[in-house]
Image (tube, grey):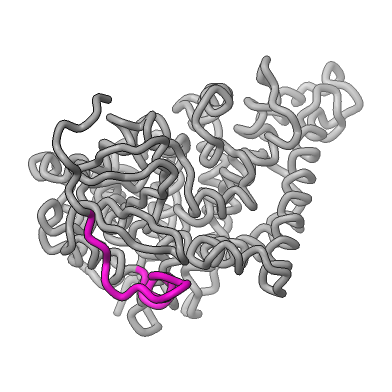
Amino acid sequence: MSAPTTAPVPTPTAPGGLPLIGHGLRLVRDPLPFIASLREYGKVVRIRIGPTPAYVVTDPALTRQVLVTDAAHFPKGGKYYDALRVFLGDGVATVADGDTHLRNRRLMQPMFSRAHIAERGDAMIDQVRTMVGAWPAAEPRDMFAGMNEITLATFLVAVFGADLPAHLEGEFTALMPEIMKGTIRQVILPSWITRLALPANRAHADRVARLRALIDQAIDHHIDVTAPGSASADGASGAETCPHASEARREQRGLFETLLGAEDQLGRRQLQDEAITLLAGAIETTGTTLAWALYEIARNPAVERRLREELASVCEDRPLRYDDIGQLPYARRVLQEAIRKYGPSWMVTRTAARDIVLGGHLIPEGADVVWSPYLHQHDSSCFPDPDTFDPDRWEADRVAATRGSFLAFGDGRRKCIGENFAWVELHIILATVLQIWPRFKVTSRPPRAQAVITVKPDALAMEFHSDSAG
């Protein structure tokens, strides 16, 4: 990129910064209103996270420049990824740009091919039907926790295969919310605080260590049950003596087998990092989206009616099949609108590799560059009435106006590797809930959006009923 021929434009600083902590208090107390308010100050706005300046990009065209056009000058980095690396390690989502990232992404890409995901489709549907069908009727359920539980179980079946020990799933479910809270705390607080031997910092480190131990157990279990000749995989002492051996092994293997069998294998630490990265994305992003989607469906009868009519026209009276997913375009629009309205990510960072001019503003080498899917997806110039839940904004004749502003899965060479898997899991769970439960309703007050790693509902209880009356 050539040097600028004109002097850079002064970068505005957001008001409200405080000594030592900068805008940290705003990011803790009202992060979503604060990040959305920055648009009014300019296309690039300086804030301070502790004493350290960061540059927030509020224009989606400039964000695309950061992620795609000039991606080489804005590698992954900054406080957000520094905090994520504490528990994700150097997974494909957090590892620095370069040869290691390219190598690992190429190794993982086959896991998320449509063919591989399709192989696990029936197992995922069976898992979801079992769990959703076991909900007690007419009892209030915490939908954020419930959706996280289902997305986790579905993820484990898809990635590690069948027969994972139950205690692993239970501990994953208990650990992840607390780890996410500790991670966002490390993002928004000054680094000198997060390095102190405080009880909260020690507890976060202990939870991360326990998570790694659990992932190691899951990997070992997966290797044991899928090894040729193992009793658990073959149903006998040897594969050649059991006529059902190959079928049993297909049932028990998961997407992770692709990595374990890769010719250029990853080391154990890297396998841990990739598994944890996938786990975090599967629970937080997918579970949060489904909780918000069910909330919006429950309070929009016309949306619910159209969803049920579409599902009935495709499946009639039978359960969902994997091949049905592509025939549910309205369900896709509902899910996409839930993702748009509620994030799910609200703050992501890059690092300026050198002094560079962005939108006329000088970004100094080493500075954090912040972009926000939540901010862009609430831009009224791209999404009219952004606080209104409107699945029809994703119809083909309207979607062109949103191009470049829907960034929930990122963009460019670091775009989310698991996007195809996420869409499949979202469709399976939403369709299954609708098929099994003819009626559901919100029983708590309207939830408030709460920014942690994702934008989650602070409280959301719903009841499910086996009759359609009422």
Provide residue 378's location: percent of width, then percent of height: 21, 59
Q: Name the quarter where the N terminus is drawn.
A: top left
Q: Quadrant of the C terminus?
A: bottom left
Please identify the quarter of the rendering in which residue 455 is found.
bottom left
- Tell me: 163 left or right of 144: right
Image vertical order of residue 263 relative to residue 159, above or below? above
131 to 425, vertically: above or below: below
Magenta range is: 11-31
Q: Does residue 426 appear in this view?
A: yes
In the image, 249 versus 206, the foreground residue is 206
* Residue 380 coordinates in the image, percent (x, y): 13, 59
Q: Nearer the viewer, residue 161 or 210?
A: 210
Asked if 195 appears above or below 432 in the picture, the reply is: below
**Quadrant hosting residue 232:** top right
Magenta region, main secondary structure: loop
Q: Residue at x 50, y 74 (%)?
A: 142
Residue in view at x 59 percent, y 40 percent: 158
Q: Residue at x 62, y 65 (%)?
A: 194
Whether residue 27 is in magenta: the answer is yes
Instruction: Find out whether residue 365 is within the magenta segment.
Output: no
The percent coordinates of residue 151 (x first, y second) are 53, 53
